[in-house]
Image (cartoon, rainbow, N blue to C red):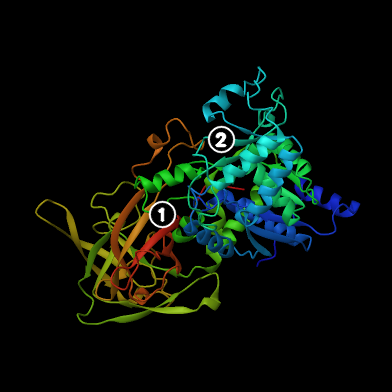
Amino acid sequence: MENKPITSNFIRNIVIQDLESGKHKEIITRFPPEPNGYLHIGHAKSIVLNFELADDFNGKTHLRFDDTNPTKEDTEYVESIKEDVQWLGFDWEELFFASDYFEEMYNRAVLLIKKGVAYVDDLSAEEIREHRGTLTQPGKESPYRNRSIEENLDLFDRMRKGEFKDGEKVLRAKIDMSSPNMNMRDPVIYRIVHASHHNTGDKWCIYPMYDFAHPLEDAIEGITHSICTMEFEDHRPLYDWAVRECEMESQPQQIEFARLNMTNTVMSKRKLKQLVDEGVVDGWDDPRMPTISGLRRKGYTPKAIRNFCREIGVSKNQSIVDEQMLEHFIRQDLNEIAPRTMAVLRPLKVVITNYPEGQVEMLDAENNPDDPSMGVRKIPFSREIYIEQEDFMENPPAKYFRLFPGNEVRLKHAYFIKCNDVIKDADGNVVELHCTYDPETKSGTGFTGRKVKGTIHWVDASNSTPAEFRLYEPLILDEDGEDDKHFLEQINPNSLEVLHGFVEDNMKDVEAHYKFQFFRHGYFNVDPKHNSNDNLVFNRIVSLKSSFKL
């Protein structure tokens, strides 16, 4: 992995203080996703933070799946998450599942009942909400709150044995129904769910709630710093209560930081799943999705994503990051590693009338002018070529320096050509140009006889490879981030444009995920999903230039 800059932030300062004070001898962090969807760019921020923080202090990071909700979780998501973490360049010290600890959690819940700080409640979910009160009014105690310890133990045991239906009973912590913190008003810590679990099968029909399970998982694993996003700040008192009342030996510290919000980007797994389920996109790995798999398929590199996550930093202040910042880092990376080549996305045929028929000339082209070590390739040139439709205008405006009748331009790596005749179809559309070339103007020969103001790219018509090009725009039109109320109304109907053109013939055997800079068009990635020998497909990763500045 590249040398990364060490940037100070408040979490790093806490870790330093804890090590210097002797509170901890070793730092152990964790990345704890719920396997109910694919990871997105917001998760990447957490992955980079947790893994690099531990690595900076020779500590450890666990990958743990918070799989306490059997109706929404699946092994498909487990495998995708592992793939994404490793693709980003990180390896976990240990791999755990919350479900590994179900027996331990159950026993700790029994301990709470025996201590008189948990009880089985018969109220429905709606009744519990009604009893909870408001931010300005205290809650009302459940009529089942003062059941005896013996009755609670018996009922909880029968819950585990499957004697009750979903929602018929829950286990609640007995804390304080008048607490100003709503999370402390006797929260539910176990519920009944008769559903098969991806890891434990049908062994359990009661499952711990996240707010109860998560602190116990951290404590069991000896996590020193439990780093989460700011929406869990109000849950921290309950986190500490669970660790304390369950008498856990290890006492992890929960620390919150601001989640990543980006313009034109959805960060809710629920909404992303909705996009997939309703066919708005063609899967979790659609290049318009902010998922790690979508970014990978589009052509983003792990290095670019890591650098982006480091640059946005860590703080408690909520803010919205311009998506162009992410694009800045992929341009920066690809500018160094992507070979240059030519592709014509909207082809217009040009016949060079004075070039010898049947002749094919091989021209030299640098793969990267900024990096001679990337070598030189040979590209064919003959009587018929393709140029971009936009590189010709029959009646051009002032300061149009590309091809028009009577004008001369340079073909990249080749010769000067001059437009003489325009061929149109019955509808008046330009379908072919007839040009002449000057054999004295070959690139690399040092020709200085005259200059032209325009240089255009091309591919040889007889020796090129057909290709499909997918051009992407933001999927969400709202520049201020996602909006719950009108989510689907913000979908950009023009987020994908599919074009059919040609690439240099030497690219006909390129493999998935090969990345190139197409002259003047931007950076492109060979699509791993739709690409084949019979159908070469390129995804545009990003255009060449942006006005964005760090």
User: Nearer the observer, disc 2 or disc 1?
Assistant: 2
Residue sticking out furthest to the left: 426
Residue 191: quarter of image:
top right
Image coords of residue 367 (percent x, y): 47, 73
Above or below 224: residue 442: below
Give whichever of discs 2 and 1 has the lower sequence position. Answer: 2
Q: Which residue corresponds to mark 2? A: 169
| Residue 487 shown left or right of residue 248 in the figure | left
Which residue lies at the image location 71% right of the left edge and 22% below the top edge? 178
Choose between 247 and 32: the one closer to the eye: 247
Image coords of residue 201 (percent x, y): 51, 57
Residue 490: quarter of image:
top left
Q: Which residue corresponds to mark 1? A: 286
- SS of the residue under disc 2: loop
Which labelled disc corresponds to residue 83? none
Mark 2 to mark 1 CA distance (whole Å): 41 Å
Residue sticking out furthest to the right: 21
Quadrant of image for the N terminus: bottom right
Q: Which amino acid, mark 2?
A: Lys
| Residue 86 shown left or right of residue 235 in the figure | left
- SS of the residue under disc 1: loop
Q: Which amino acid, mark 1?
A: Asp
Q: Are marks 2 and 1 in contact (CB under 8 Å)?
A: no
Choose between 163 and 389: the one closer to the eye: 163
Using a 10 Å C-alpha cutoff, classify the residue at mark 2 as few (fewer than 14 neighbours), some (14 to 19) or many (20 or more). Answer: many
Q: Is residue 435 visible?
A: yes
| Residue 142 shown left or right of residue 450 in the figure | right
